[in-house]
Image (tube, helix red, strand yellow):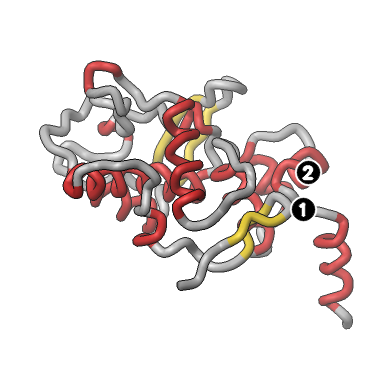
Amino acid sequence: MARRRWKTGKWDGIAVPDIEFGRIACRQAPIELAFLFKCDFCLFTPGINSGLRVSDLLKPKVSDVVHGAGRHLERITLREQKTGKAKSFPISITAARSIKEYLFARTGVHSMEPLFLSRKGKGDGHLQRAQAYKIINDAARGVGIMEPIGTHTLRKTFGYWASKDGKDITSLQKSLNYTSPSVTLSYIGITQDDLDGVYLSLNL
């Protein structure tokens, strides 16, 4: 089965198959594991489709992403914890699907509950940064990625692949809320080789 490698700060290859991502490196009963897989995948998918810092990714309540009628919202609006800046962005189709599947598997959902609950139980509020770090690392180890990764991996993945898809650096800078294009390029792992490739591939 195809796998991805973490190479020089970038994802190299195709998307991690859902079944591989679900092989979490912990011993859980099958029903618990099935639920945790949906939760982990739900954390992963909006993370790589939004460019949010993990502190902001973990903040939304259920009501921030789902209507009272059970339909997902088209946009998420929040204020970034680090910068204090407002951010509004559309929920991608893949992110909306992962949220829907996760909430469907979760019992007794209340609109004012955190979207991502602490692994210690409902009474402990939001999933914490350290727990998110463990989820991402366990999933990476489960699909054979041994290189160091962290909670910024999801955000960097968004930026890198948006750049590779042809999105201009000014738009990316605004999406990630950075102060300059150079800082943005450095953060998402765009190297001089990548920039040279623009000239060499054009070849008019």
Labelled pair 1, 2 in contact (Cβ < 8 Å)? yes
Examine the rendered structure and indicate whether residue 112 appears above or below residue 158.
Answer: above
x then y, percent, for residue 199: 88, 70
Q: Residue, x 31% and y 39% (percent of image)?
A: 65
Q: Residue furthest front?
A: 27
x then y, percent, for residue 170: 72, 47
Please name the amino acid that badge 1 sits on.
Answer: Ile
Q: Residue, x 23% and y 49% (percent of image)?
A: 34
Q: Pointer 1: what residue?
A: 190
Q: Quadrant of the C terminus?
A: bottom right
* In this rendering, position of residue 34 left or right of residue 150: left
Residue 184 shows in the view:
yes
Please name the amino acid that badge 2 sits on.
Answer: Ser
Examine the rendered structure and indicate whether residue 85 appears above or below residue 176.
Answer: above
Q: Which residue lies furthest to the left in this view?
A: 108
Q: Quadrant of the N terminus?
A: bottom left
x then y, percent, for residue 174: 65, 40
- Secondary structure under tag 1 reads loop
- Secondary structure under tag 2 reads helix
Total marks drawn?
A: 2
Q: In which quarter of the image is residue 120?
A: top left
Q: Residue, x 66% and y 47% (percent of image)?
A: 172
Q: Residue, x 63% and y 48% (percent of image)?
A: 147
Give the camera-side residue of 67 and 31. 31
Q: Pointer 2: what residue?
A: 186
Residue 104 shows in the view:
no
